Image (cartoon, helix red, strand yellow):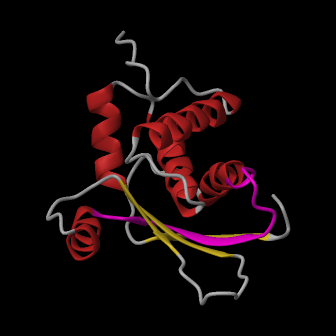
């Protein structure tokens, strides 16, 4: 890991199948190699109640979601390595992995990378941005040995 990268991992809950701090840091670091030499961020693993409250407060959606990113907005003209926070809902990630027929660790890696890319300004709300972000996610996950998250999972 780059010495100039400070990645804090917080667990607000415990559940079977959650990745350890080292895995989360490895995935976040991989996403940070996309142009950031110095970075500070946190990844917080939460339950459905916490993610629902955040989703309601910041996006006006009264439901649980898999990942939220909160980019740091500093003062104009002030440089900072602080990128922001990524919040991931463990129960939603686990349920989605089953529903989509994906390996749990691959889905976790995808959502950590997805969240960290959002902190760096990547967006998927417009077609061009979505294609760019999805292609980068696929490339990064391939480097980890995971399948393309945008291809349908092969059911056994």
* Position of the C terminus by quadrant: top left
Which quarter of the figure is the N terminus placed in?
bottom right
What x and y, as percent, mark residue 25? 66, 57
Q: Can you give x and y, in whole percent of width and height, for residue 4 in the image?
A: 82, 70
Say left or right for 140 vs 110: right
Q: Is residue 84 magenta?
A: no
Residue 19's x, y, as percent?
53, 50
Residue 124's place in the image compared with 98, above or below, is below
In the visual, does 111 lie left or right of 74?
Answer: left
Q: Nearer the viewer, residue 118 or 130?
A: 130
Res 98 → quadrant: top left
Note whether 12 is above or below 88 in the view shown.
below
| Residue located farthest toward the right when viewing the structure as drawn | 3
Q: Which residues are magenta?
A: 32-47
Q: Residue 142: x and y, percent? A: 64, 27
- What residue is at 17 percent from the left and 59 percent from the top? 63
Q: Is residue 2 left or right of residue 94?
A: right
Q: Quadrant of residue 155?
A: top left
Residue at 49% across / 43% down in the picture?
Answer: 129
The quadrant holding residue 68 is: bottom left
Please name the residue shown 28% across and 55% down the image: 65
Residue 44 within the magenta-colored segment of the rendering: yes
Q: Residue at x 45, y 39 (%)?
A: 130
Viewer-closest of 22 and 4: 4
- In this rendering, is residue 146 above or below 54? above
């Amino acid at each position: 890991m780059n010495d100039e990268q400070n990645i804090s991992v917080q667990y607000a809950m415990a559940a079977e199948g959650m990745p350890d701090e080292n895995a989360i840091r490895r995935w976040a670091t991989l996403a940070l190699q996309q142009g950031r030499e110095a970075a500070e961020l946190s990844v917080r693993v939460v339950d459905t109640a916490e993610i629902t409250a955040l989703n309601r407060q910041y996006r006006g959606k009264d439901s649980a979601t898999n990942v939220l990113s909160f980019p740091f907005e500093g003062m104009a003209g002030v440089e900072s390595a602080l990128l922001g926070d990524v919040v991931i809902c463990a129960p939603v990630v686990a349920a989605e992995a089953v529903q989509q027929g994906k390996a749990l660790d691959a889905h976790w890696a995808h959502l950590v990378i997805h969240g960290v890319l959002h902190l760096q300004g990547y967006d998927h709300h417009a077609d061009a941005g979505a294609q760019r972000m999805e292609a980068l996610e696929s490339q990064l996950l391939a480097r980890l040995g995971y399948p393309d998250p945008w291809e349908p999972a092969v059911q056994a």
